[in-house]
Image: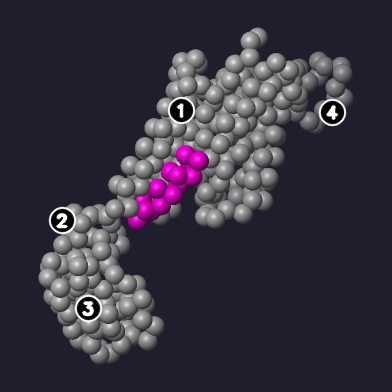
Amino acid sequence: MPFHSHIKPGDYLTLLGGVAFTIWVTVAVWSGGIADTALIRSGGKVFKEVPLSRDQQIEVPGPLGVSIITIEKRRARISSDPSPRQYCVRQGWLQQAGEIAICLPNEVSVELTGGEKKYDSLNY
Amino acid sequence: MRIENRAKTVAAGSARRSIPDHRSSIRLDTTAEDHHIAKMAAVALGLTVLENAIPSPLPGVKPGLANIVTLIVLARFGWRAAAWVSLLRVVAGSLLFGNFLAPGFFLSLSGAVCSLAVLALSMHFPQRWFGAVTDSILAAFAHIAGQMAVVYLWLIPHSGIAYLIPIFATAALVFGTVNGLIAARFMDNTQNHPLPLEGEG
């Protein structure tokens, strides 16, 4: 039997297809929708809905004190909060639709929403 | 092993002089192919144990070395033998690790079943152009697809797990390719001088 490799030309094609598929999946899944609005909640109720297009700071009162939400360059973050562990502050900038920062003790949250809400942990 | 083998088990057992006749035991009349499948499954099982000793950066991301055996069996002995080896490995492996009928077992099973389904198609690709690497990559993707389906439909019915798909897809691509290359290389090496793996049965 003449020797020939078990690696065939079509295998490279499959590999290429696999790479393309993986890249496509990654882009499709990890680049969430473009956010255009920040939805600010306080005590479970919508406090304010602001567009991301305008840079501003919003003061949101909660049971512990005032949380400050900063909107800048189409991003939003909680820049100051009276909660003891500062989880929501340390979460940093939110950029994609569906991202959310919650300050539980102060009952303040900011959620980015876009044209199409893909993954919403509150939905299920 | 065919089902009808079981039916003629008792008769065959008592008819054979060479085998000690324990009246209380049931003897399965096994064929050479059965023995061969069992051997291959044992090799696959060994690889599974080996691979479990390798720490994984993320639960669920495993090289799937046992699939190298499945690929070789598929190329040499056809889909039926490959299915036997793969499923025996899943069941025996789960018994070995103590997670039979536990979630991990069903994840393995769904992955294996999906892989086998895809292999049933990919093995009919023109042999001239597509080899073990193609089979391996496609099977690896089918494997994670099957697992993600079980995870989503049963274990974590939350769309958030979609975020993990790129990680699993990358792992499938890398390990699928590597396993395919190993299988192809193995078959290259044993083409002219068969190793014991090719065994007479």
Chain for disc number 3: A
- Out of B1 and A68, give the one closest to the viewer: A68
- Quick one: label 3 or label 2, which is nearer the N terminus? 3
Marks 3 and 2 sit apart, C-alpha to C-alpha, by 22 Å
Disc sitting over residue B22 in the figure: 4
Residue beneath disc 3: A69
Q: Amino acid at mark 4?
A: His
Marks 1 and 4 sit apart, C-alpha to C-alpha, by 56 Å
- Quick one: label 3 or label 1, which is nearer the N terminus? 1
Disc sitting over residue A115 in the figure: 2
Residue at 13 percent across and 66 percent down: it is A53
**Residues under numbered marks 1 and 4 in contact, where contact means CB atoms less than 8 Å apart:** no
- Out of B24 and B110, give the one closest to the viewer: B110
Marks 3 and 4 sit apart, C-alpha to C-alpha, by 81 Å
- Out of A62 and B152, give the one closest to the viewer: A62
Q: Is residue B82 left or right of residue B134?
A: right
**Residues under numbered marks 2 and 1 in contact, where contact means CB atoms less than 8 Å apart:** no
Q: Amino acid at mark 3?
A: Ile
Marks 2 and 1 sit apart, C-alpha to C-alpha, by 39 Å
